[in-house]
Image: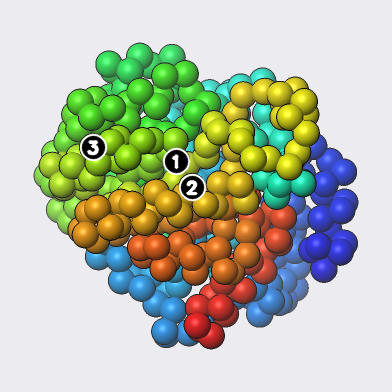
Amino acid sequence: MYKSLLKPILFRLKAEQAHHLTMKLFRLALSLPFGKSIMRKQFCLEDESLHREVFGLSFKNPVGLAAGFDKDGKYFKELENLGFGFIEIGTVTPKGQAGNPQPRLFRLPQDGALINRMGFNNEGLDTFVNRIKNRSDDQVIIGGNIGKNKLTPNEEAYKDYEICFEALFPYVDYFVVNVSSPNTPNLRDLQEKEPLTKLLAGLQTLNQAKMGPKPILLKIAPDLSDGQLDDIIDIVATTGIDGIIATNTTIDRSNLATEMSTVEQIGAGGLSGAPLRKRSTEVIRYIHTKSKGAFPIIGVGGISKPADAIEKLEAGASLVQVYSGMVYYGPTLIKDINKALLDA
């Protein structure tokens, strides 16, 4: 139904407009009589053998939703009905910010890809917390993806992350430190060893002082060199954080089927979707092998079909996340990945 009916209609709209419309329609469908039960029957797959224990948390299946889809925590209750084992919301920053000017989200249909330069657009931490603080449905694990405001200088960035950590601690199940988006100026500089160690060590100090510390993960870029990945492995060991999310979007534009003139016209932004698959898997395999499996990895980037998810799990990921692939494949991607895992 999605590929034959909804997708052609949605792809006539601008990408960001289509996203918001889709979520409003999905919420409406769930509100109809028997809407929730119909949706769950269509999209959810429950099986004990899909359960995973990772980071000390119990996931009902290993397929999650990547950050960026539900930036403001508006839809996580609805999205659970698509069969996700976990949902990551954000990126949230202490103060609300508009992000970059529109248009800032673009499709590359020939490549099964998206380019975005959203720029951490979100309504701010207070609004975010108000949405999730009365969370009553604990069936699905919720992760909080945290970042810094655009106007916060890098030397003060740790304060933004700590503010977000403290405010969200009672309400999310794990944290993701996002220093790898290419759409906030100089943010990726925080991936360098010294500032990143300081940032993560500070968060761990706060975390370990809590009753029942929560998992802290680091989301990294696919554009890091092997030497930088070695530094990341050392930083995980030094700071004692719980794992890595590999990877965020890429600034690489090589080997695209889309005409380069079209790509250049779109301009700056992070590329996600099918072209990212290979590099993301390479990063997962490198980190898993070099660290000797010392910590869990969530694999994300270019999962456009069930086989792509299995590839990442075989490379060393403990869990996977989807986003762009769902835009092209449709919302049955989650169920189809879980089916493939049961059949493997």
Q: Which residue is mark 1?
A: 222
Q: Nearer the viewer, mark 1 or mark 2?
A: 2
- Mark 3 lies on a secondary structure that is helix
Pick the front one: 47 or 167: 47
Q: Which mark is residue 328?
A: none
Q: Is residue 26 left or right of residue 284?
A: right
Identified by mark 2, the residue type is: Arg
Find residue 169 and report its horizontal and vertical position in percent. 29, 46
Disc with the residue nearer the chain's start (1 vs 2)? 1
**Horizontal and vertical percent for residue 329?**
70, 61
In the image, 325 versus 162, the foreground residue is 325
Give the residue drawn at x 57%, y 80%.
339
Residue linked to disc 2: 279
Q: How is the image coloured?
A: rainbow
Amino acid type at image mark 3:
Asp
Find the distance from the CA under tag 1 to the CA under tag 2: 7 Å
Q: Identify the secondary structure beneath mark 2.
A: helix
Q: Which residue is mark 3?
A: 231
Q: Which numbered disc flags the more N-terminal residue, 3 or 1?
A: 1
Q: Are marks 1 and 2 in contact (CB under 8 Å)?
A: yes
Q: Say which residue appears at 35% left-offset and 23% top-offset.
A: 189
| Residue 276 can be seen in this image | yes
Q: Residues within 10 Å of mark 2 (few under 14, many from 20)?
A: some
Q: CA distance from mark 3 to mark 1?
A: 14 Å
